[in-house]
Image (cartoon, rainbow, N blue to C red):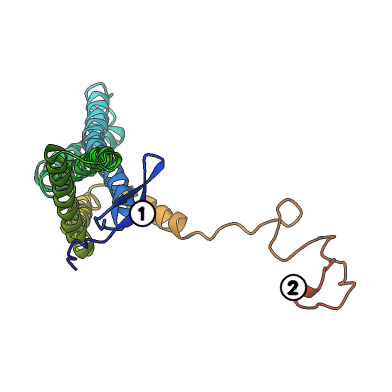
């Protein structure tokens, strides 16, 4: 969608005053500023995600390790009671297995996902952020060139017989603005044409890493079911909790959509029910 720079005069607002200049400027800069802001937020969110994912992996491993240490301590300090000793030994073995699974997941899954995200998500977003900063810098450079050109144009127009040197400076300033405008127009056109591809690969990499991590964790942790019979009951409880419907709203305590006044279950409708916009219903 590349457009040639048109050489017709436009009235633009620059530094609070109207300036006449023969350079067509792409309408994209305002949207580009918004995109730069979004990239800044995305970069910060990605870095925070990696930081918190590392913290979560370390915290979960430390938590399981401390559980194992506690059960081993209980096993070492236990009395000669075979039944309780067997229960403690079962917990100690299960915690040992869980710790091994966590460390295995950290090495083979978390570290792999982190490397992928750092290389294929954070690094490209950082590069795009720096590239956008350079474009914004070029926008400011063009603005300054416009101010310089306008000052020279005004100075030349006030002179009855401008010198050849002044005219040469004016032409050079005009060519400089035209080149800066053409370069920015080309950059904005390229960004506009690539809208459907910018960060597409990075988003797919993020999604793939989450799917991979969830599936590998599920397969590894399923090994604990035979070792810890009580886990199945907790899984069932979590399933029920995750599917529980929201509690019904009490119309006496909470505002209910469509009910303007509630006087109890034994009252009758005083008026014929009409469409919502044409009636005030009292129940």
Q: Which of marks 2 and 1 is nearer the N terminus?
A: 1
Quarter in which the C terminus is drawn: bottom right
Say if 238 sits above or below 1 in the image: above
Q: In this view, does 82 lie to the left or right of 244?
A: left
**Image mark for residue 276:** 2
Q: Label 1 near label 2: C-beta < 8 Å?
A: no
Residue 236 quadrant: bottom left
Residue 82 is at least partly visible in this image: yes
Task: Point out residue 150 in the picture as x, y percentages from the top left corner.
Answer: 27, 42
Which residue is denoted by mark 1 in the rendering? 11
Disc 2 crowd, CA 10 A, few/some/many (<14, 14-19, 20+) = few
Please state which of residues 192 and 240 is positioned toward the viewer in this rendering: 192
For the point 17% across and 66% down, which residue is it? 2
Q: Position of residue 51 (x, y in %)?
A: 23, 35
Viewer-closest of 61 and 20? 20
Number of marks in the image?
A: 2
């Amino acid at each position: 969608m590349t457009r040639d720079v048109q050489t017709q005069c436009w009235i633009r607002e620059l530094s609070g005053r109207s300036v006449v200049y023969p350079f067509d400027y792409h309408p994209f800069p305002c949207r580009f500023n918004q995109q730069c802001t979004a990239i800044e937020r995305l970069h910060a969110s990605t870095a925070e995600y990696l930081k918190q994912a590392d913290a979560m992996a370390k915290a979960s491993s430390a938590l399981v390790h401390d559980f194992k240490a506690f059960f081993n301590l209980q096993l070492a300090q236990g009395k000669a009671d075979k039944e309780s000793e067997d229960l403690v030994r079962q917990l100690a073995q299960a915690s040992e297995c869980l710790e091994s699974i966590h460390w295995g997941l950290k090495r083979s899954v978390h570290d792999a996902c982190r490397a992928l995200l750092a290389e294929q998500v954070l690094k490209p977003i950082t590069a795009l952020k720096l590239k956008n900063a350079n474009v914004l810098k070029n926008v400011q450079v063009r603005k300054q060139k416009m101010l310089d050109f306008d000052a020279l144009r005004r100075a030349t127009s006030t002179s009855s017989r401008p010198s050849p040197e002044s005219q040469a400076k004016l032409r050079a300033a005009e060519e400089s603005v035209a080149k800066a405008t053409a370069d920015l127009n080309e950059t904005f056109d390229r960004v506009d044409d690539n809208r459907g591809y910018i960060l597409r690969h990075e988003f797919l990499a993020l999604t793939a890493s989450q799917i991979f991590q969830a599936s590998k964790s599920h397969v590894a942790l399923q090994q604990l079911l035979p070792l810890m019979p009580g886990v199945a009951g907790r899984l069932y409880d979590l399933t029920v909790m995750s599917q529980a419907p929201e509690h019904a709203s009490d119309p006496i305590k909470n505002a209910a959509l469509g009910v303007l006044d509630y006087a109890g279950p034994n009252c009758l409708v005083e008026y014929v029910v009409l469409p919502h916009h044409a009636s005030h219903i009292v129940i």
